Amino acid sequence: MKRKVVILNTHTPINCDLHDYIEIACTFGYEIAVECVNGNKWIGVARDTGNNKNVGEWITISTENDEQRNILLSSILHIVVLTEQAKFKRLMLSPRENAHVEH
């Protein structure tokens, strides 16, 4: 499996409450659509989170072609959950979008 780290901007930690929802997505293996502030979009299964003090926090997703992609949380505009009956539907992570969760 290939691993890529997408570095789009400097590290800005997200709200802990929102981070909990990202952990839920990974725990239950939700299929998600991720849109970044620069317009990049990915669809995949939430697998894990990671953190590096020099890079920041990221979410790892598995894409359709079995590629593992690490996406910095600080670069994400929003995450839409595609899995039916998930515990939440959408996470808005960008501060300019008033970061929040939609159920």
Image (spheres, rainbow, N blue to C red):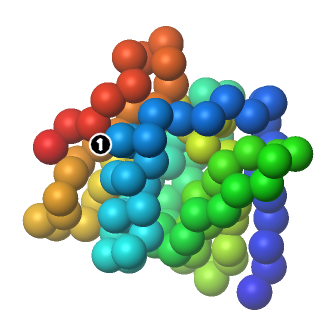
Against 97, residue 47 (above or below) is below
Q: Which image quarter: residue 86?
A: bottom left
Q: In terms of depth relative to the viewer, which is nearer, 40 or 61?
A: 61
Residue occupying the point 53% across, 35% down: 14
Name the quarter where the C terminus is drawn: top left
Query: Residue placed farthest to the right in the image?
Result: 54
Against 9, residue 43 (above or below) is below
**Left or right of 39: which side holds 102?**
left
Q: Where is residue 42 in the image (x, y as percent from the top left)?
A: 56, 54
Against 100, residue 20 (above or below) is below
**Left or right of 25: which side holds 84?**
left
Q: Where is residue 93 in the image (x, y as percent from the top left)?
A: 46, 32
Name the quarter where the N terminus is drawn: bottom right
Q: Name the residue under label 1.
A: 90
Q: Kindly state the secondary structure of the residue where label 1 is placed.
A: strand
Q: Which image quarter: residue 12?
A: top right
Query: Residue placed farthest to the bottom in the image?
Result: 1
Residue occupying the point 42% across, 17% down: 97
Q: Which image quarter: residue 79?
A: top left
Query: Residue placed farthest to the top in the image?
Result: 96
Residue type of the residue flagged with mark 1: Arg
Q: Position of residue 47 (x, y in %)?
A: 52, 74
Count residues near mark 1 (Cα–Cα under 10 Å), then give few for <14, some for 14-19, many for 20+. Answer: some
Residue occupying the point 74% across, 34% down: 11
Q: Where is residue 77 in the image (x, y as percent from the top left)?
A: 51, 31
**Left or right of 40: which side holds 6?**
right
Can the viewer see residue 31 in this picture?
no
Residue occupying the point 38% across, 74% down: 27
